[in-house]
Image (cartoon, rainbow, N blue to C red):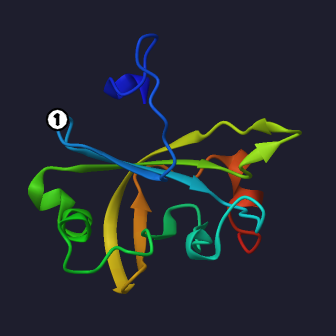
Amino acid sequence: MAAFGYYNEEKAPEFREGVRYFADKGTDIFFITLNKSDKDFSPSTLYEDYAINERLFHWQTQSRTTEGSNTAQRYIHHRRMGKRIALFVREYKKDNGYTSPFVYLGEAEYVRHEGDRPISFIWRLKEELPPMLVPVANKCIV
């Protein structure tokens, strides 16, 4: 967030949502917690976010996002619009009582979507999933 001028020594705003759009940078950032627990997330925020394989990632929008919304259209048409999608992930919200850090997966490109409120997106990572995340991002990856 500091790289985008959102967070610095003078400015430390609260950030609760897992998505943030920086219009001046033309970038959407997704902060994804892979293993969500009922105590940390409400039923409406227990999104299904996981790696399909080392290059494809399934991600769900916030529960109020509709396919026709400006946000969803920006995700779907990001390449044509000259926008970027950046993914950050972590395994758990907390580890040993401390907030877990996010790992930058890099940029992703739209593949397809389905559904509404939330919308399920498939993203293609520009770089393969880091080996340390393969076992936690999807137990089915061999």
104 vs 78: above or below: above
* Image location of residue 47, percent across then percent down: 57, 72
Q: Which residue: 43% across, 16% down?
A: 8
Q: Is residue 72 left or right of residue 116?
A: left
32 vs 60: above or below: above
Q: Which residue: 19% across, 50% down?
A: 83
Tag count: 1
Label 1: which secondary element = loop
Q: Is residue 92 left or right of residue 111?
A: right
Circle 1 packing at 10 Å, graded few (<14), some (14-19), many (20+), is: few
Q: Nearer the viewer, residue 43 or 60?
A: 43
* Image location of residue 108, percent across then percent down: 38, 55
Q: Quadrant of the N terminus?
A: top left
* Image location of residue 134, percent across then percent down: 70, 57
Question: Which quadrant would residue 81 be assigned to in this image?
Answer: bottom left
The amino acid at mark 1 is: Asp
* Image location of residue 52, percent across then percent down: 58, 72
According to the picture, the residue beneath numbered tag 1 turns out to be 24
Q: Nearer the viewer, residue 85 or 33?
A: 33
Q: Which residue: 33% across, 28% down?
A: 4
Q: Quadrant of the C terminus?
A: bottom right
114 vs 137: above or below: below
